[in-house]
Image (cartoon, helix red, strand yellow):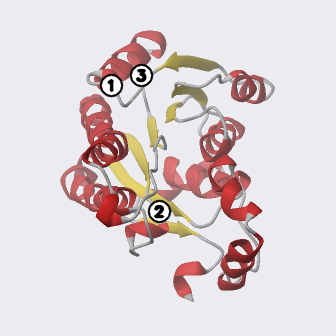
Amino acid sequence: MQGFSLEGKVALVTGASRGLGQGMAVGLAEAGADVIGAGVSNMSETKQKVEALGRKFYEIKADLSQSGAAKQLVADAKEQTGKIDILVNNAGIIRRAEAADFTDEDWAAVLNVNINSVFTLCREVGNHMLENGSGRIINIASMLSFQGGLRVPAYTASKHAVAGLTKSLANEWSSKGVNVNAIAPGYMATDNTAALRADEARNSYITSRIPKGEWGTPEDLKGPVVFLASDASSYVNGHILCVDGGWMGS
């Protein structure tokens, strides 16, 4: 299992305070990586889980909706740890409204966090990785990287863009030792989906559409993120890995 080991690696995970980000941060730590958690929310729970595994946890406050925040985050991370071997672009926001009523402000806010900051982080961390001749970038896509969704035009556009950016960067960087891939989670039981799961009719419909018959959890992303972060996936490039209980196959 040596190919899956992340011993000696440092992973930067955005949006690591809870949910999917926390699940992936803990999974990376379980595989041996130290973790830099970045976000606006309190990360004490994630810190406790990572340190309980004997790994180091560095917390950096970063509001990726703000101009210059992504670039500053990378500078701060490198200053604290000296290197970044793995980047997980997990932070994202969603705004819901009918397309005809969707405001310019909401459109700009979603695109700024979900794709503009992702590109900046990929570029800044990517340059660091290119200098070292190795690295792993894992972007978090979505089922809406493939589908249209309802009442989420900006989110859908941003997640299509994440998939395209992943493939574009893989074309440029794979031959230089930097793997760029993405994970597309399906319907996951997190704070962000609490309202959907509380709606009995909507929850029942969604669950019936999932071949596995149940919602996923943050723990379901541990294996996929460790695989894509490790040498075990050295020949996997520009791939969008669906972790969806079979949703896309249905």
Location of residue 41 in the rendering, given as x and y in whole percent from the top left corner: 59, 25
Give the residue number, with chain letter if any, for mark 3: 83
**Alpha carbons under labels 3 and 2: distance apart:** 28 Å
| Tag 1: amino acid | Gln
Closer to the camera, 40 or 125? 40
Camera-side residue: 68 or 169? 68
Figure quadrant of residue 207: bottom right
Percent x, y of residue 228 = 50, 54
What amino acid is found at the position of numbered circle 2 in the picture? Ser
> Which structural element holds mark 2?
loop
In the rendering, at what x and y percent does residue 188 appear? 66, 60
Q: Residues within 10 Å of mark 1 (few under 14, many from 20)?
A: few
Going by the picture, which residue comes out furthest to the bottom? 250
Tell which circle, 3 or 2, labels the residue nearer the N-terminal end: 3
Mark 3 or 1, nearer chain start: 1
Query: Dot 3: what SS?
Result: loop
Q: Are marks 3 and 1 in contact (CB under 8 Å)?
A: no
Q: State the mark number for residue 142.
A: 2
Residue hosting label 1: 66
Mark 2 and mark 3 in contact (Cβ < 8 Å)?
Answer: no
Q: Residue at x 73, y 52 (%)?
A: 219
Residue at (52, 27) in percent of width and height: 39
Q: Secondary structure at mark 1?
A: loop
Please name the amino acid that badge 3 sits on.
Answer: Lys
Residue 117 appears left or right of 26: left
* Residue 157 falls in image quadrant: bottom left
